[in-house]
Amino acid sequence: MESFLQFIKLPINEKLYLKDPQSSEIGNKILNESIELINEIGFEKFTFKKLAIKISTTEASIYRYFESKHKLLLYLINWYWSCIATRLLFETSNIQDSTLRLQKAIHVLTALPNPEKEHVLPNEIALKEVVINEASKVFLTKDVDNENKDGVFSVYKTVVNNVVEIIQAINPEYPFPNMLITTVIEGSNQQRFFAQHLPKLTNSSQSSDLVEEFYQDMIFKAIQHG
Amino acid sequence: MESFLQFIKLPINEKLYLKDPQSSEIGNKILNESIELINEIGFEKFTFKKLAIKISTTEASIYRYFESKHKLLLYLINWYWSCIATRLLFETSNIQDSTLRLQKAIHVLTALPNPEKEHVLPNEIALKEVVINEASKVFLTKDVDNENKDGVFSVYKTVVNNVVEIIQAINPEYPFPNMLITTVIEGSNQQRFFAQHLPKLTNSSQSSDLVEEFYQDMIFKAIQHG
DNA sequence: ACAAATATAATAGTATTACTATCATTTAAT
DNA sequence: ATTAAATGATAGTAATACTATTATATTTGT
């Protein structure tokens, strides 16, 4: 029953690839090993050539799956969002109390994946690292409007919307639910980056991770009436 | 008296340049025109060659000031932080009431520069655009730890610290002041990006800018006792 | 079992990027 | 007027981000 969840094939926007990477061995290698390589050397220094060597194939083969390294990163980030969307569904299902629902949702958005518990993706922990270090780069470009038209941010928007609805169930008068949720999603990743590299900018640390605690506190105070 | 403020030469960390760009005409052109060009084509497509053509000089000349385009961006972002640090000082000076001080500080951190009012830099409005679209890229790299050792983020840290102290004057028990401030600084830039490009992710828009209002509300609720 | 279709490997090539190096010339300082 | 410093002009390099071509496997349908 538990392993039901594991490794479902999550559908990804077709504009993001030339050939579905989840449909072949090489494709799956591209996904899994690119996560490793990006974590190792950073997205700026990551190239298809280096990835090709790592997975013993050729640059040209990788280009048959993805038209650019930017699209590959966008694919990975979308994979993560789909995974969060799935976890949101599971963790809030059968829970009626809105406050508890919101608490669970914030947990899914802000906590690190637990290595003990089962995952939706085989490499969720490494993928979360990619998200923390690289995710902003997928929208901070001049191409964002065209890519948005192609719907590549729609899963992200759905996630935000689902949590916004929970907030509205608690306090329909609160005027900034979308801002609050995106602030929490993006902020929680940034705080983890700060904890690792610029600790003076945060109160959290790797030994004592306060990220979820901080945002749970912040959200519930923010949506209070008055 | 008003114009006192205008265009003070703000000191910038020496590790960021090879030759002080504020010391020559070409240097100043590099700063001002790179802001324009980055806003026009985005940092990824920005090159020293294109900038050289724009300011009628050569690539080699620009390389005499900055060792890479990344260092130039870091310089610009530091320029912005220095400018914010200066404005924080001015706007909170002679104000005793901590709550009012915090309100003013949040205003400096979250509001767009007012085109009517005087500026600390000649191009503050365009520079703010660069910050909104590109600032995260200066620390989201594998080089962040080395650059941090060189002190290139110290002005940012000082800004954060100064506001943290105001919060502590209001509520010394609040456990997450640094997280709260960096969440607001980074979040306010991100919300403006969303308003321009991914409006479903925010409640703010270009016609009705709710960014400051949202964060003022959020901060004061967050630091409330209990 | 065999032909046809498809996927991958191997290789080559291109324009651009992100620099470094050299040397001549202009400009500024003493 | 001399020297030093800044800039211009030009060249060159390794790496990047691709595209193209052809040969060789592998899979699939019949």
Image (cartoon, coloured by chain):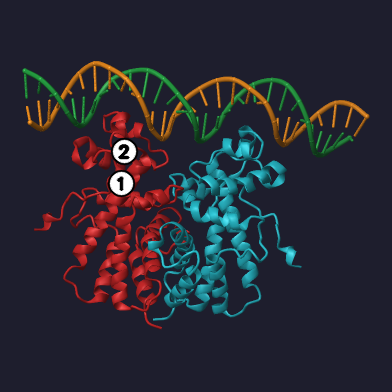
Chain colours: A cyan, B red, C orange, D green
Q: Is residue B111 visible?
A: no
Residue placed under numbered mark 2 in the picture: B66
Residue B45 x/y as whole percent: 41, 38
The Cα atoms of the two marked residues, 1 and 2, are separated by 9 Å
Determine whether label 1 and label 2 are within 8 Å by CB. Answer: yes
Tell me: residue D15, above or below residue B164. Answer: above
Tell me: residue C19, above or below residue A96. Answer: above
Residue type at the position of mark 1? Tyr
Residue A222 x/y as whole percent: 42, 75
Q: Residue at x 55, y 51 (%)?
A: A151
User: Looking at this view, is A95 or C20 the one in front?
Assistant: C20
Left or right: A184, with B213 as reference point: right
Residue A59 x/y as whole percent: 61, 34
Question: Pointer 1: residues within 10 angstroms few (<14), some, or many (20+)?
Answer: many
Badge number at residue A37: none
User: Looking at this view, is B36 or A69 the one in front?
Assistant: A69
Q: Secondary structure at mark 2?
A: loop
Residue type at the position of mark 2? Phe
Q: Residue at x 30, y 78 (%)?
A: B170
Instruction: Answer with the quarter of the image where residue B40 lies.
Output: top left
Chain letter of the residue beneath label 2 in the structure image: B
Q: Extreme bottom residue here?
A: B226
Question: Pointer 2: residues within 10 angstroms few (<14), some, or many (20+)?
Answer: many
Residue placed under numbered mark 1 in the picture: B75
Q: Is residue B172 visible?
A: yes
Q: Both on one chain, marks 1 and 2?
A: yes
Q: Secondary structure at mark 1?
A: helix
User: Looking at this view, is A19 or A200 the one in front?
Assistant: A200
